[in-house]
Amino acid sequence: MRNTTTRGILERLKNGIVLGAEGYVFELERRGYIKAGPYVPEVVLDFPEAVKELHREFLRAGSEVMVALTYYAHREKLKDVGRENDLECMNRQAVRLANKVACEGDALVAGNICNTWAYDPHNAHATSRIVHAMYEEQLTWAVEEGIDFVIAETNDYLGEALIGLEVIKQLNLPAMVTLATVQQDKTRDGYDYVEACKILADHGADIVGLNCDRGPEIMLPIIEKIRAAVNCYVAAQPVPYKTNPLAPTFESLRLSNGEHAFPLALEPFLCNRFEMATFARKAQALGVNYIGICCGGAPHYVRAMAEALGRTVAASKYSPAIELHPMLGSDVDEKDKSFLTDWKG
């Protein structure tokens, strides 16, 4: 376990909401440090300062958890970019970077595992062994470097999520396990999302819920049902995109010309900071315990969510003060009032 004096994840959840922040891969791709397509976090080794800076920005914005950037840092994905020999180094370095920034504030460090693309429910016996080994090596390194708990996320299959949970519990760590919701109402191995979360809870997951794929308004109705079905803590980490009943996931969003917006043309569908603040308040009202954000997330969203939950964070020093704007503020100089027609249309 990580040597720290901070309160652990379960103690924090017992005493109130924990605010998390993800979206590292999408944000670092936008900044020019990760290649879209494979989405392998090579940045951990190639530009470690970029990773530390994003951790730091999330920390200042109010995130209580620094998530080690090991999403897709597993054997199957590293083969795609010819970096399978960097597997151990990449995983260890990601946890070290998260730890360095977590120590700058009262933050926890989460190890991270995700969907492997290796699991096949039709060949579960053989593929389960492969997935188990992949998770075990990643998390063994993470534990040696020092983590507080593990987030196993973006699980398409309940079967694969249960493998991740088994490995986490073998390592005696708190487990947060969240499902992807690409399909309409069931995991890819046929379990209703609410039922799947209940099964995970019954198998010992400390936190269950959903992450990625769906925007806030489309995710929350499922989260409400999950909250009613389980006794453990519940997590909700939507993408900050305006998905809708006809296009419930950001993978299904289409541009005006009919082309898919995912993954490189999603900007027209972005939520604004006020909408993400509203999500945080709605999630709080539903009894969600771990509130966060996933792909597309950025520090300004996290700050807005933190402030919506009644918190003042380091970045709040620079929160908007529109009343001081020369044209939109409350005291426009007489000589500047001629600009108002153009500014306000």
Image: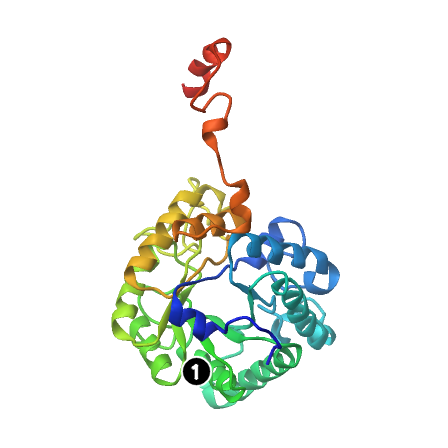
| Residue 26 lies in quadrant | bottom right
Using the image as rendered, state which of residue 90 and residue 300 is in the foreground. 300
Residue at (44% x, 61% y) in the render? 212
Task: Determine crowd level at label 1: few under 14, some 14-19, many 20+ residues with C-alpha closer than 10 A.
Answer: many
Q: Where is residue 135? Give x, y as percent.
A: 56, 81
Picture mark count: 1
Q: Where is residue 19? Give x, y as percent.
A: 45, 60
Horizontal side of residue 199 vs 12, given as left or right: left
Residue where numbered disc 1 is placed = 162
In the picture as drawn, the residue positioned furthest to the front comes out as 5
Asked if 147 appears above or below 105 in the picture, the reply is below
- Colouring scheme, one of rainbow, by chain, secondary structure, one colour: rainbow
Asked if 204 appears above or below 80 in the picture, the reply is below
Using the image as rendered, state which of residue 242 and residue 205 is in the foreground. 205
Q: Where is residue 11? Give x, y as percent.
A: 44, 74
Residue at (71% x, 60% y) in the render? 48
Using the image as rendered, state which of residue 200 and residue 129 is in the foreground. 200
Q: Is residue 209 visible?
A: no
Badge 1 amino acid: Leu
Q: Where is residue 52? Give x, y as percent.
A: 66, 59
From the image, which quarter does the C terminus lie in? top left
Horizontal side of residue 17 vs 285, given as left or right: right
Horizontal side of residue 171 vs 211, given as left or right: right
Residue at (38% x, 46% y) in the render? 275
